[in-house]
């Protein structure tokens, strides 16, 4: 046999390297793990030893594949040696407080995402469970993960404990729970507050009367993005911010089916020093911005989809600013039937679609620049009960305009 024929024959007998370091499988009553060479790493009784066998596979490091259905009764810690854990037809029943505890304790750039957890469904079975907790880690990727819960639990928790958790990417995930919090940022006593450049994209959160994304106090989620995602609530909150979300952009759809839903809720520890921009499309009738302590100070800017102008009587729509963050010219359009209210140093646009007579009520309005009215402006037809200098009304019975000079009403000739 010549050299060429020998090499071709030898290569035909070679097995291609498998695309994993270790694989976990089930066969009837047995669960086992084997490495890339086919050597058995660990085995045990299905439904009893699933967690220990999976941990043995993770000890190999590299890329791990899980095939089949598993019942996990103790937490699985994912360390820095693991590149990825990917499921194939993988369904996990969670019977422990925390299912996956990712703690790599290392700094990675946002372009190097590791470890990756992907392609699996997690079903929670009791109150107080957290499906995935990422602690003191940088660069984790969660992709195509479904978390199902009939309880008010936590789906994904990003936690700073001794270090910081940054550059996390959550992509194409689905979380369904009756309450609780789908995605939570939590500081557990760390002096490091940063959760910088967290990306949540193409993700669907259904939380009932719970919270879609919650940023707790002492958490700084700076330079982060929510992209093309949706939150479904019933008397719940889409986004809750009790910490910092500087220079972040959230783009999401909020579908509210209850009577007390909130799109963006501001907690008492809100401390932004740079704007958070929210591009929001809504269905239903939520309160768009709930800021009871008036803390946002122009540092939360909400831009609504035009179809969301019909929110219901006095539904919050947006703050109005120009490019220099000063109060902008205000255009009042009669055909849009929107009102303007002033609070502190801000101007708010409000929906008047259900106003009883369709008149545009301006109330107590102050603008530092010009106010333009497009359409018809109606003024009172009787004297206001508490006039101030400059107040006016028109008496239709005499055809007389009156202006208050601070002490008395003065008539104005209209000819």
Image (spheres, rainbow, N blue to C red):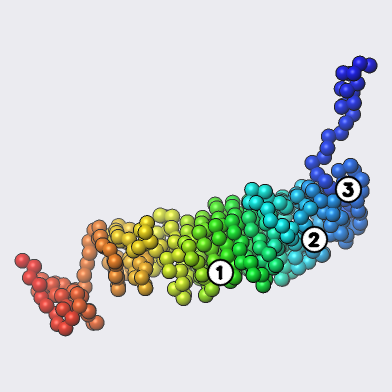
One can see residue 253 in this view: no
| Residue 243: mark in rendering | 1
Q: Residue at 90% x, 18% y: name it.
A: 3
- The image position of residue 126, as x and y in percent, is 74, 69
Front one among 414 and 370? 370
> Which of label 1 and label 2 is nearer to you?
1
The CA span between labels 2 and 3 is 18 Å
Dot 2 falls on a residue whose secondary structure is: strand
Q: Residue at 79% x, 60% y: name it.
A: 77
- The image position of residue 211, as x and y in percent, is 59, 67
One can see residue 167 in this view: yes
Residue underneath mark 3? 34
> Which of label 3 and label 1 is nearer to you?
1
- The image position of residue 237, as x and y in percent, is 55, 67
User: N-terminal of the two: label 3 or label 1?
Assistant: 3
Residue underneath mark 2? 76
């Amino acid at each position: 046999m010549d050299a060429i024929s020998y090499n071709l024959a030898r290569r035909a007998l070679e097995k291609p390297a498998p695309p994993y370091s270790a694989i976990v499988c089930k066969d009837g009553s047995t669960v086992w793990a084997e490495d890339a060479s086919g050597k058995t790493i660990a085995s045990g009784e299905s439904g009893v030893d699933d967690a220990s066998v999976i941990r043995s596979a993770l000890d190999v490091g590299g890329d791990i594949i899980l095939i089949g259905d598993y019942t996990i009764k103790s937490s699985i810690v994912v360390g820095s040696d693991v590149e990825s854990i990917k499921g194939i037809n993988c369904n996990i029943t969670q019977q422990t407080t925390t299912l996956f505890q990712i703690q790599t304790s290392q700094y990675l750039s946002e372009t190097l995402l590791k470890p990756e957890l992907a392609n699996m469904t997690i079903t929670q079975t009791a109150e107080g469970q957290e499906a995935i907790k990422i602690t003191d880690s940088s660069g984790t990727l969660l992709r195509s993960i479904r978390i199902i819960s009939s309880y008010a639990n936590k789906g994904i928790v990003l936690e700073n404990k001794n270090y910081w958790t940054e550059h996390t990417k959550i992509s194409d995930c689905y979380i369904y729970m009756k309450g609780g919090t789908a995605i939570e940022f939590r500081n557990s006593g760390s002096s490091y507050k940063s959760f910088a450049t967290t990306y949540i994209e193409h993700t669907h959160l259904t939380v009932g009367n719970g919270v879609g994304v919650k940023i707790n106090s002492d958490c700084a989620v700076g330079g982060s993005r929510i992209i093309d995602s949706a939150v479904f609530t019933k008397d719940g909150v889409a986004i809750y911010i009790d910490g910092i979300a500087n220079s972040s952009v959230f783009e999401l759809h909020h579908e509210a089916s209850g009577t007390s839903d909130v799109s963006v809720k501001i907690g008492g520890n809100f401390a932004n020093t740079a704007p958070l921009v929210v591009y929001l499309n809504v269905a239903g009738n939520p309160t768009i911005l709930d800021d009871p302590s008036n803390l946002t100070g122009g540092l939360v800017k909400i831009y609504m989809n035009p179809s969301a102008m019909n929110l219901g009587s006095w539904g919050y729509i947006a703050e109005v600013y120009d490019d220099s963050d000063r109060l902008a010219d205000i255009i009042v359009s009669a055909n849009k039937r929107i009102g303007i209210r002033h609070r502190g140093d801000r101007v708010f646009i409000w929906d008047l679609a259900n106003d009883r007579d369709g008149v545009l009520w301006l109330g107590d309005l102050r603008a530092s620049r010009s106010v333009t009215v497009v359409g018809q402006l109606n003024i009172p037809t009787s004297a206001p009960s508490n006039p101030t200098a400059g107040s006016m009304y028109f008496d239709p019975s005499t055809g007389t305009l009156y202006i208050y000079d601070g002490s008395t009403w003065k008539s104005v000739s209209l000819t």
